[in-house]
Amino acid sequence: MRLAVVDLVGTALVDGGLALDAVRRGLAGVGVPVVGPRAPALERQARAAMDRPVPRIFADLLDGDLRRARVAAEVYEAWLRDEADAGRVRPTDGAAPAMSALREAELVVAVVGNMSAATCTRLVQAAGLPADLVLAPADVGGRGLPEPDLVLRAAATADVEPADVVVAADSVAGIAAAARAGAGLALGVLGGAHPAATLRAAGAHDVLGSLAELPARLGLPQPGQDSSAPLGGSGAVMP
């Protein structure tokens, strides 16, 4: 493998209700009650759509009202950036050392998320995640997970064939993107959106307990000390 594509929230970044809280903020921002009789059904619908691009989540929740969905998505992302600035986002256990170990073994490490490029980059930086590349749906015409475009763009940017790509993701959307892109290895990661059985049913070749297990799964040395590199924005490969 020459490239590792790592999903962001739930795989490299602790979710812990972060994304669902952001959805609630977005809905409240367009006047949708997030408490009361409708709240449980709305929450179930949000959880089912959580691994889709943010505008798509709100379009589904708001019955296709694209104008309100855009506003809600802006509130969602602004709140996440505020959480990052306040130091309330953190990497999953062992994620940063594992990503450093991959880079030390000369794999390119790409982080992908279904948010805007600015929000993805802010979260990666705030969590201290070492990455060579950060990609968002805006980099591929808005086609986020589960479409294959983010994986294919990462491969093209790193100048590797899809067969030399390993994708690590906590969601069905991430595994589906890996399969559609022809990635050589699709690994589910527990602790995020979906359980092991669901990830395997979606086509995961294997399921890891956490991202910390990825280097060993690839036969690489155990993670050493974290060595992050500064990020310079969406779509840029870092030294």
Image (cartoon, helix red, strand yellow):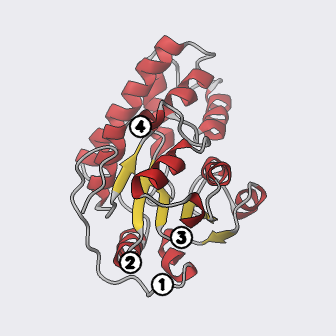
Badge 4 is on which residue? 139
User: Could you say whether the residue bearing mark 2 is in a helix, strand or loop?
Assistant: helix
Q: Amino acid type of disc 4?
A: Asp
Report the side of 239 relative to 158 (left or right): left
Whether pointer 4 and pointer 3 mark residues with C-beta atoms closer than 8 Å, the reply is no
Q: What quarter of the picture does the C terminus occupy?
A: bottom left
Residue at image position (41%, 31%) is 76
Q: Amino acid type of disc 1?
A: Leu
| Number of the label disc, if any, that sits on residue 220 | 1
| Number of the label disc, if any, that sits on residue 210 | 3
Q: Amino acid type of disc 2?
A: Ala
User: Could you say whether the residue bearing mark 1 is in a helix, strand or loop?
Assistant: loop
Quadrant of the rendered image containing residue 25: top left
Quadrant of the rendered image containing residue 199: bottom right
Quadrant of the rendered image containing residue 165: bottom right
Numbered marks: total: 4
Q: Estimate the spatial distance between the alpha carbons at disc 3 and disc 1, rounded to whole Å.
A: 16 Å
Residue at image position (39%, 82%) is 223
Sequence-earlier tag: 4 or 2: 2
Whether pointer 1 and pointer 2 mark residues with C-beta atoms closer than 8 Å, the reply is yes
**Horizontal and vertical percent for residue 214?**
52, 74
Badge 2 is on which residue? 101
Sequence-earlier tag: 1 or 2: 2
